[in-house]
Image (spheres, grey):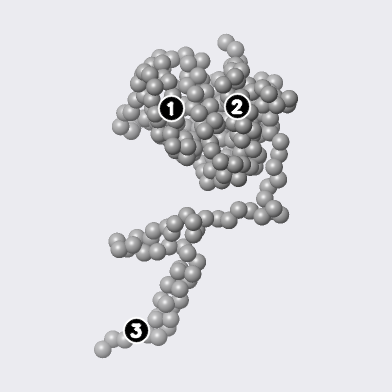
Amino acid sequence: MNRIPAFLKWLTSSLLAIALLTGVFVIRGDGQATPLPAEITAVPNATQETAEPEVEIHNLMFALIDSGQKIVSVTVIRYALDGDKLALVNIDPATLIVPPGQGFVPISDAGLQGSFDGIDKSISGALGIPIDGSIYLQRLAYAGLVDSIGGITIVSDNLYRVSEDGEFPRYVRVGTSLLDGSDAAGYAMRRSKFESTDQFMARGNQVLRAVFENLQGDQERVDEIFSSLGSIARSNVPTASIAKLIIVLRAANLWPSADISRLPVN
């Protein structure tokens, strides 16, 4: 009769023990690995010694990137130093800039030519807007932010497609709608060929305001939400600094009175 060698028994039992002790996975009935609950596998917060120090942000560039890695929306959120004014500066992605190591390219294509590093500095220099930090969100990341607040309510002035090419068509119709993350991201990022640049930017402002106004919790909780987006969101400042700005703007209730402008002015 065949017998299993002793060293194979030892190896098998050791591997199972390591898997269980490290909390990497459990096995489902279909033989596939299933992640353990987030409460067990979550990465602990960085210690004070290792955490990236916060920076003071008054001008945050918020950029959205579509599935083709094009920048489709750029907004600079400007919080006045005296603490009682908020301005949104929408920037046309067709604006030409000169990122590090590149020639003149539209903002929309800047990331395709290299990396997104330095684009905020190029925009700041070209348009004369001081930018303290930037965050770039892919569509899935923006959808995740919206879903973290349970969706948003918007008022649409027209019929707009919000699904990507190749997906089953989904639309936002005229009037008030409650949008989940996927549709809200599409509403902010997908431009109709029948609308003006200003109309498209106005839609993006609706979503941005709804997200920033309704991200609930203290600074640590909001920081946690941004940190959980992982590689589909990139920033050149600590997410804790971005979270602090969101909390300050929400507490001061500055969004309803925000001054909205556009650069360049055509």
Q: Nearer the viewer, residue 69 or 187?
A: 187
The residue singled out by tag 3 in the image is 4
Spatial separation of the CA atoms under disc 3 and disc 1: 63 Å
In the picture, residue 1 is in which quadrant? Answer: bottom left
Percent of width and height locating residue 8? 40, 80
Spatial separation of the CA atoms under disc 1 and disc 2: 18 Å
Label 2: state its secondary structure.
loop
Going 43% across and 20% down the picture, which residue do you hit? 155
| Circle number at residue 153 | 1
Q: Which residue is the extreme one toward the top? A: 266
Going 34% across and 25% down the picture, which residue do you hit? 171
Percent of width and height locating residue 201? 51, 20
User: Along the horizontal axis of the image, is 50 left or right of 266?
Assistant: right
Q: Amino acid at mark 1?
A: Thr
- Contact, mark 1 vs mark 2 (Cβ under 8 Å): no
Label 1: state its secondary structure.
strand
In the picture, residue 222 is in which quadrant? Answer: top right
Q: Amino acid at mark 2?
A: Asn
Q: Amino acid at mark 3?
A: Ile
The residue singled out by tag 2 in the image is 253
Mark whose residue sits in front, 3 or 1: 1
Spatial separation of the CA atoms under disc 3 and disc 2: 70 Å
Percent of width and height locating residue 69? 49, 34
